[in-house]
Amino acid sequence: MKMRFFNNKIAAIFILMLLISIIGVRYYFKTNETAVENTVKPRPVKVIEIKEETYPITLDYIGTIDTKEIKNISFKIPGKIKKIYVSKGEFISKGEAIASLDITDLGFNLDAARAQMDMARANLNKAEEDNKFTLNLYNKIVQLYKEGTVSKQQLDETELKLNVSNESLKAVNAQYEQAEANHESIKNTIKDATITSNKAGYVVEVIGKEGENINAGMPVVLTRPEKQIVHVGLTQEDVKKVSLEHHAKVKIDNLKGEGKISNIDYIPDPKSRTYDIEVEMINQFSSEEFLIGSIVRVSINVDDRKGIWVPIKTIMTDGEDYVYVVENNRIVRKNVILQQIYEDKVLVNGLLSGDLLVSEGMRNVKDGYLVSIEG
């Protein structure tokens, strides 16, 4: 019985030792798997040699194509719309006709006013001739009175006729001036029956319709200026960093353009407490792309920075930001500090000019791996 217990004990010890040996071997191979594998199989990677480069330092914001640039085009007088000469999205030049009213009745009124003015002019001409004749007669009577040829009564009668003639001339002249003013007023009204663009721009929307009766001041067409303006609200800190003529990149969806700051408002918006700036596009988008109310991305270039800029895709993180470089055909991990981003580049601290940065294959390697450089 003791012998059997002794044999079982030996067997248990043997099994335990065997398990410990297996675990130890597995641990050894697992911990040394990387070194063994990379001694035999170098991993292929692509690298780029790091050098100092200069890229812009930017302020990145969301901007808007604002409705404050929209202008209502309307008639000064009421009437029926006869013709609209423009369409949505169309470019219009300064002074170009936009729409006109039916002026049939105004034409009749103008003819009547012209006839009345002509009659008043004829009456004025006759009154001027009569007044001239009476004045000459009076001057002669005055001379004859001085010579003693005519009496004082005759002089007084002639003077009275001259006074009457003067008053009559004033009245007829007033009638003519009124007729002339009425004629001019109707002419101006007819002129107001056609609205024109006071500056070059684009038609945003056509609201009025031909044949529609419309009141004075009601919008017929909406336009925006020829200049394309993007509005951006900057923080108090950032507005101090910008100035007029600073350039900016503007992105509408996948379309890119360039502009410059044309206006800075140093009084903050009472709601957002941001400072509005206007970015005027240098190379303009099409009217179909530059839609009022659209949200755009704006990057304002405020400075240039020279340093080590690397592709953002090469940055990895595990709680710390790092990259892989190749030294003596082996992977070396280097922790980096991210400072500034510009498009697909990031300015970092922690790398040196001349380092071979792993640009492709970094997901398949680890610190210490043996690698082969391709390309």
Image (tube, grey):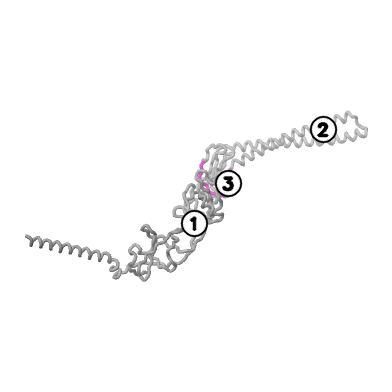
Near-viewer residue (180 or 361): 361
Residue linked to disc 3: 197
Residue extending farthest to the top is 153
Q: Is residue 55 visible?
A: yes
On the image, the x and y values in percent for residue 180 come to: 69, 37
On the image, the x and y values in percent for residue 256 come to: 47, 56
The C terminus: image quadrant: bottom left
Q: Main secondary structure of the magenta part?
A: strand
Q: Kindly report which numbered mark, 2 or 1, lies closer to the viewer in this rendering.
A: 1
Where 200 sits versus 215, above or below? Answer: below
Element at label 1: strand
Q: Is residue 198 magenta?
A: yes
Element at label 3: loop
Q: Is residue 375 visible?
A: no
Residue 125 in the figure: left or right of residue 234: right
The N terminus: image quadrant: bottom left
Q: Residue at x 49, y 58 (%)?
A: 57
Could you tell me if the residues under marks 2 and 3 are in contact, i.e. CB atoms within 8 Å? no
Residue linked to disc 1: 58
How many labels sit on residues? 3
On the image, the x and y values in percent for residue 157 come to: 85, 29
Which badge, 2 or 1, comes first in the chain's sequence?
A: 1
Near-viewer residue (6 or 324): 6
State the extent of the magenta-drawn residues as a range. Answer: 195-207
Residue 284 circle label: none
The residue type indicated by label 2 comes to Leu
Residue 210 in the figure: left or right of residue 107: left
Residue 162 circle label: 2
Q: Is residue 255 magenta?
A: no
Where 225 sits versus 116, above or below? Answer: below
